[in-house]
């Protein structure tokens, strides 16, 4: 039995009927009834009729479909596709772009004299845009192609097949229905005269006669590779400002170029939606005579991204050097020198100014040092300074310690610390000088440790600034700063032999300083420490840090004075070494993290926020490791205090540096100075009497 296209109910009925009919056939066979007699049955005749009718219907449908196909092919025989995709649907169903064509492209380069090979390799193959500024040299089109020229051209060539199906006309925002309509606008309007409606139109030329005339006025651009094909269809766009084409997709299969024959045109290239997070919008203004090819290139921003990324990598190397060098150099055990080679004598200069709550205890540590031969030379500028009383009481307490008190400063330069120490320096007995600031606390063996590092080629041994254990947030902050941000640079600089001597505690070979003219030579600088070390290294001597960090233990410990001190130091550094102005802020975790996060976004398309957070976390961990190395024992605060103190320091650091840059005058204790580039200081206000 044949099956027809039928509903389910009908199919079931037919199946039943078929079964019954088969049963009848079987019965008729069993009863030996011939088949031709069955045909006489009414039901069989009806069934045959239905089959014939159905066949006729089928033939009819086939004929109609063939007729439609024939008509369609006749009508649309020029179309490439059997069924055209509606233009809106083609945008939805277009294949996604490979974003490599626009990733890392921030600018459209303007180039001249480009070779065919360069054009092909640098722009065509990677699909990048460019503007060739000498693209239309020797063309007559720039002078010839005017509105009137096109009007005359099309009027004189109208009989050519002007209405070809591939002739396209874009009226944009104008009211024109066709090119003919547009070319018929008033002369005033065509010249964009004030008071007339603006216009901007574009069309593809499909007029063969007009095409061959047009081609006399321009050439194939010189930079197009020989093998590149030229499509005969030319597009012409003209009009005034403000009425240009809207943002659209040019669905062209080949790279295209556009010559700017008159005026200028702003091109905006937007990435397709699938590349929005990888590419950015580009803009370029193409001037008369320039040819632009659409696509981008890596430029200044890319250069910056590489710079920041490399700088960021260098900082991680500095982190590692500081950690490993700190572990190796700091707190190393030493064996005291044998009695046969006795320790040389040391004259210790203690410049004092005023009294703080810890001064007595700090000074006392100098009377109890385990060092065989030294003298203590206290220098106090002002004879009314209460520090005099304090020193005298210590001298009485430790009469066996060789101690002298120098009251009154020599005026040999602007640096008050040098002025204060000058008389004592001149009276010093020993071949080594220890300059030690008032807030420094010594351990019994600190001077031994310093002297142990004073080998033959070394003329200056200094202590890396750190701070003693004190309570309060300001003390925590100080310890975090000196044990992390400053130690990092200090240790790395010492490791790679860069001068970063801070003069709060420095053992100096006096003979070398005398060769430089003594302390007074450095009285013109506020940062005498830096210039002393520089003079030594210039003479071929080495400087190095000892294994014990300097324990600053001033009794004045508050956030404001700490920040003022850091700002003052920053001003000194900037004046002495101007490159610090740019590089120092970049050594800050939060600042370089931001730049590096941006860089990796540009260079590798990594997620900037995630990168930044990981950067801060690892930086934080490295700082914690370094701080524990510098402390070499349990810290006087817990991890939570460290987190708060560290965040405060890291966030305030860049601000303090900026503040230092914006306010270059320097206030140091009772005096105010200004610094010239190079570090020479000048006092600008008379001394303030407290
Ligand atoms: C790729 C890396 C580039 C690195 C750029 C480095 C920028 C510097 C960053 C941080 C600064 C930390 C510097 C270390 C300590 C400086 C402390 C300081 O400023 N001290 C000055 C003031 O000291 C007091 O001055 C008055 C005196 O009487 C007191 O007794 C002193 O305590 C001091 O004058 C300056 C000393 C030297 C400063 C040198 C700074 C340049 C450091 C460049 C190091 C580069 C290391 C690069 C590692 C790769
Ligand atoms: O006018 C001054 C300023 C400072 N000093 C001494 O110089 C050393 C460093 O001073 P300060 O601690 O103020 O400098 P900082 O370490 O903050 O740069 C200390 O011993 C001060 O007593 C001095 O003798 N006269």
Image: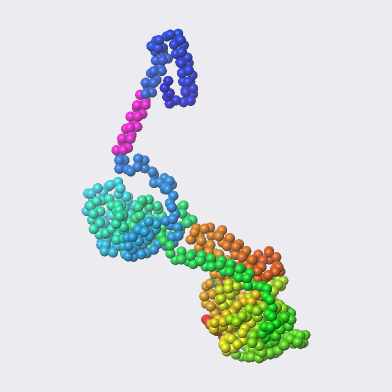
Q: Where residue 84 appears, x then y in whole percent? A: 36, 42
Q: Quadrant of the C terminus?
A: bottom right
Q: Is residue 5 left or right of residue 629?
A: left
Q: Is residue 209 magenta?
A: no
At horizontal 29% and vertical 57% (from top left) the residue drawn is 226
Name the one closer to the observer, 58 or 305. Answer: 305
Q: Is residue 155 above or below residue 26?
A: below
Q: Where residue 680 appears, x then y in whole percent? A: 55, 84
Name the one closer to the observer, 458 or 273. Answer: 458
Query: In the picture, residue 299 is in which quadrant?
Result: bottom left
At horizontal 39% and vertical 21% (from top left) the residue drawn is 51
Q: Is residue 67 magenta?
A: yes
Magenta residues?
Answer: 56-74
Q: Is residue 186 above or below residue 523?
A: above
Q: Is residue 646 left or right of residue 317?
A: right
Judged by its main secondary structure, the magenta piece is helix
Q: Is residue 108 above or below residue 487?
A: above
Name the one closer to the observer, 495 or 159. Answer: 495
Can see residue 130?
yes
Q: Is residue 367 left or right of residue 204?
A: right
């Amino acid at each position: 039995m044949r099956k027809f296209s039928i509903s389910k109910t009908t199919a079931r009925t037919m199946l039943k009927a078929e079964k019954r009919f088969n049963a009848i056939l079987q019965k008729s066979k069993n009863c030996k009834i011939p088949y031709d007699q069955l045909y006489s049955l009414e039901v069989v005749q009806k069934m045959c009729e239905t089959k014939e009718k159905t066949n006729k219907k089928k033939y009819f449908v086939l004929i109609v479909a063939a007729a439609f196909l024939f008509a369609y092919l006749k009508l649309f025989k020029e179309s490439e596709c059997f069924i055209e995709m509606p233009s809106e649907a083609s945008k939805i169903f277009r294949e996604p772009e490979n974003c490599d064509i626009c990733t890392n492209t921030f600018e459209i380069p303007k180039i001249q004299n480009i070779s065919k090979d360069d054009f092909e390799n640098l722009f065509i193959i990677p699909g990048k845009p460019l503007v060739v500024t000498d693209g239309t040299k020797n063309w007559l089109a720039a002078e010839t192609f005017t509105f009137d020229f096109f009007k005359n051209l099309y009027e004189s060539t109208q009989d050519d097949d002007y209405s070809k199906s591939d002739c396209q006309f874009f009226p944009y925002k104008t009211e024109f229905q066709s090119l003919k309509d547009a070319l018929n606008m008033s002369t005033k309007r065509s010249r964009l005269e004030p008071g007339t409606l603006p216009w901007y139109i574009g069309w593809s030329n499909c007029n063969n006669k007009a095409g061959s005339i047009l081609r006399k006025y321009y050439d194939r651009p010189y930079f197009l590779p020989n093998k590149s094909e030229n499509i005969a269809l030319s597009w012409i766009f003209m009009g005034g400002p403000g009425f240009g084409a809207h943002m659209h997709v040019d669905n062209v299969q080949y790279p295209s170029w556009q010559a700017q024959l008159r005026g200028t045109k702003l091109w905006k290239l937007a990435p397709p939606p699938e590349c929005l997070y990888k590419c950015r919008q580009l803009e370029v203004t193409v001037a008369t005579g320039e040819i632009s090819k659409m696509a981008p290139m890596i430029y200044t921003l890319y250069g910056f991204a590489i710079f920041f990324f490399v700088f960021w990598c260098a900082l991680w190397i500095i982190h590692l050097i500081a950690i490993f060098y700190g572990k190796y150099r700091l707190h190393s055990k030493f064996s005291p020198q044998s009695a046969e080679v006795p320790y040389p004598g040391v004259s210790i200069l203690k410049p004092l100014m005023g009294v703080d709550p810890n001064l007595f205890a700090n000074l006392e540590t100098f009377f109890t040092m385990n060092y065989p031969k030294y003298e203590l030379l206290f220098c106090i500028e002002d004879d009314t300074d209460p520090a005099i009383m304090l020193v005298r009481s210590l001298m009485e307490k430790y009469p066996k310690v060789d101690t002298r008190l120098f009251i009154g400063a020599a005026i040999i330069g602007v640096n008050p610390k040098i002025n204060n120490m000058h008389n004592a320096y001149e009276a010093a007995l020993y071949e080594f000088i220890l300059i030690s600031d008032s807030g420094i606390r010594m351990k019994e063996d600190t001077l031994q440790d310093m002297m142990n590092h004073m080998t033959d080629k070394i003329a200056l041994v200094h202590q890396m600034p750190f701070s003693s254990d004190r309570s309060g947030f300001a003390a925590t902050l100080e310890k975090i700063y000196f044990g992390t941000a400053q130690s990092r640079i200090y240790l790395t600089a010492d490791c790679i032999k860069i001068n970063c001597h801070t003069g709060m505690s420095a053992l100096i070979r006096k003979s070398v300083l005398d060769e430089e003219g003594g302390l007074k030579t450095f009285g013109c600088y506020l940062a005498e420490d830096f210039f002393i070390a520089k003079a030594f290294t210039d003479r071929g001597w080495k400087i190095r840090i000892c294994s014990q960090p300097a324990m600053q233990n001033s009794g004045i410990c508050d956030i404001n004075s700490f920040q003022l001190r850091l700002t003052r130091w920053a001003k000194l550094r900037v004046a002495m070494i101007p490159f610090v102005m740019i590089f120092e802020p970049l050594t800050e975790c939060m600042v370089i993290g931001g730049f590096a996060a941006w860089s990796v976004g540009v260079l590798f398309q990594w997620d900037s926020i995630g990168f930044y957070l990981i950067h801060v976390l690892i930086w934080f961990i490295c700082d914690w490791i370094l701080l524990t190395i510098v402390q070499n024992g349990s810290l006087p605060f817990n991890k939570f205090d460290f987190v708060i103190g560290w965040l405060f320091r890291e966030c305030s650091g860049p601000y303090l540096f900026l503040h230092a840059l914006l306010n270059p005058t320097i206030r140091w204790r009772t005096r105010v100075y200004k610094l010239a580039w190079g570090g020479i200081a000048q006092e600008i206000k008379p001394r303030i009497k407290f």
